[in-house]
């Protein structure tokens, strides 16, 4: 189970980073073209990516803490 949590955490970190980058690009394009709607959509996507990345961080932290507890039992 812990391996699944770590794997899911890494997956969320990578996907979140990708969404964050896409959002920044979209925000920038909206700024260059004067499209405020596109800027807002980009900013929302960027924040969604940051949130997903944080979820991945927490999943990996929980996995690490769980492994530490398991090793303490040895």
Image (cartoon, grey):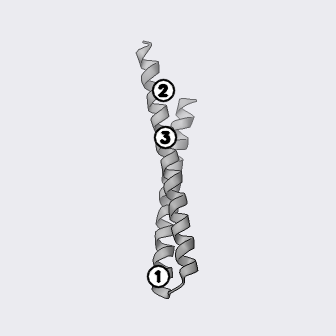
- Tell me residue 11's x, y (percent): 53, 48
Name the quadrant of the N terminus: top right
Which label's residue is closer to the chain start, 3 or 1?
1
The residue sitting at 53% across, 71% down in the picture is: 42
Which label's residue is closer to the chain start, 3 or 2?
3
Q: CA distance from mark 3 to mark 1?
A: 33 Å
In the picture, the disc for residue 58 is 3
Q: Helix, strand, or loop for circle 2?
A: helix
Q: CA distance from mark 3 to mark 2?
A: 12 Å
Packing grade of label 3 (10 A; few <14, some 14-19, many >=20) is: some
Q: Helix, strand, or loop for circle 1?
A: helix
Q: Helix, strand, or loop for circle 3?
A: helix
Instruction: Tell me the residue that label 1 is attached to.
Output: 31
The residue sitting at 51% across, 43% down in the picture is: 9
Name the quadrant of the C terminus: top left
In the image, 43 versus 6, the foreground residue is: 43
Packing grade of label 2 (10 A; few <14, some 14-19, many >=20) is: few
- Tell me residue 7's x, y (percent): 53, 40
The residue sitting at 52% across, 46% down in the picture is: 55
Instruction: Tell me the residue that label 2 is attached to.
Output: 66
Label 3 close to label 1 by CB (< 8 Å)? no
Q: Nearer the viewer, mark 1 or mark 2?
A: 1
- Which residue reaches farthest top? 74
Q: Nearer the viewer, mark 3 or mark 2?
A: 3
- Tell me residue 65's x, y (percent): 44, 28
Q: CA distance from mark 1 to mark 2?
A: 45 Å
The residue sitting at 57% across, 72% down in the picture is: 41
- Tell me residue 28's x, y (percent): 45, 77
In the image, 31 versus 67, the foreground residue is: 31
């Amino acid at each position: 189970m812990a391996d699944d949590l770590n794997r899911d955490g890494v997956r969320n970190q990578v996907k979140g980073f990708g969404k964050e980058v896409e959002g920044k690009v979209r925000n920038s394009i909206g700024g260059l073209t004067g499209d405020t709607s596109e800027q807002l959509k980009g900013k929302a996507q960027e924040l969604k990516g940051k949130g997903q990345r944080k979820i991945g961080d927490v999943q990996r932290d929980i996995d690490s803490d769980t492994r530490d507890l398991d090793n303490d039992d040895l």
